[in-house]
Image (spheres, rainbow, N blue to C red):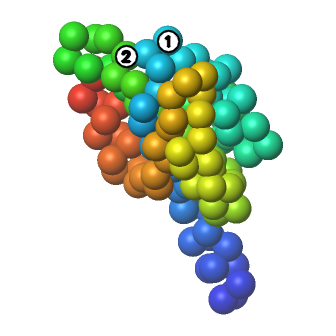
């Protein structure tokens, strides 16, 4: 029973990173290439969420849902790697922060 309870707890965890400093023209394909080799929850079309500013323009940030803590650790190792000529800040995030950022755009 303890094993089952531990698995249920793990299943409820979320592994989310925030990418900042993205080119305003960045696409889901760009982000998926940046995170190549990592398992994006729901694939690149459902697991990558770009945010917009108050004028509804790209903010240069996105949230990416990952499948595991290993994917999260690997993503964090990409902090300050580049997309084009821009270095990208990678930080861990929470589901609450992710949800709040998405709701703010609605």
Residue 82 shows in this picture: yes
Determine the residue located farthest toward the bottom in the rendered image: 2
Residue at horizontal 50 percent and vertical 37 percent from the top: 88
* Residue 61 numbered tag: none
Q: Residues within 10 Å of mark 2 (few under 14, many from 20)?
A: some
Q: Secondary structure at mark 2?
A: strand
User: Is there CB contact under 8 Å for labels 2 and 1?
Assistant: yes
Q: Give the x, y percent position of residue 44.
A: 66, 28
- Is the residue 94 above or below the residue 31 in the image? below
Report the front residue among 2 and 52: 52
Q: Secondary structure at mark 1?
A: loop
Q: Give the x, y percent position of residue 32.
A: 68, 30
Determine the residue located farthest toward the left in the rendered image: 54
Instruction: Identify the image quadrant of residue 81.
Output: top right
Q: Read off the residue under disc 1.
A: 25
Residue 46 shows in this picture: no
Residue at horizontal 43 percent and vertical 16 percent from the top: 24
Q: CA distance from mark 2 to mark 1?
A: 8 Å
- Is the residue 72 above or below the residue 7 in the image? above
Q: Give the x, y percent position of residue 92.
A: 47, 55
Left or right, 59 with respect to 26, comes to left
Q: Give the x, y percent position of residue 84.
A: 60, 22
Q: Read off the residue under disc 2.
A: 58
Rendered-image quadrant of the N terminus: bottom right
Residue at horizontal 29 percent and vertical 31 percent from the top: 103
């Amino acid at each position: 029973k303890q094993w089952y309870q531990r698995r249920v707890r793990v299943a409820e965890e979320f592994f989310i990173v925030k990418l900042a400093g993205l080119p305003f023209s960045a696409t889901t394909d760009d982000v998926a290439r940046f995170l190549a080799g990592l398992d994006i929850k729901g694939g690149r079309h459902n697991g990558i969420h770009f945010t917009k500013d108050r004028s509804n323009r790209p903010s240069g940030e996105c949230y990416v849902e990952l499948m595991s803590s290993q994917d999260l650790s690997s993503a964090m190792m990409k902090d300050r790697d580049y997309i084009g000529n821009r270095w990208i800040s990678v930080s861990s995030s929470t589901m609450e922060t992710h949800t709040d950022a998405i709701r703010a755009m609605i």
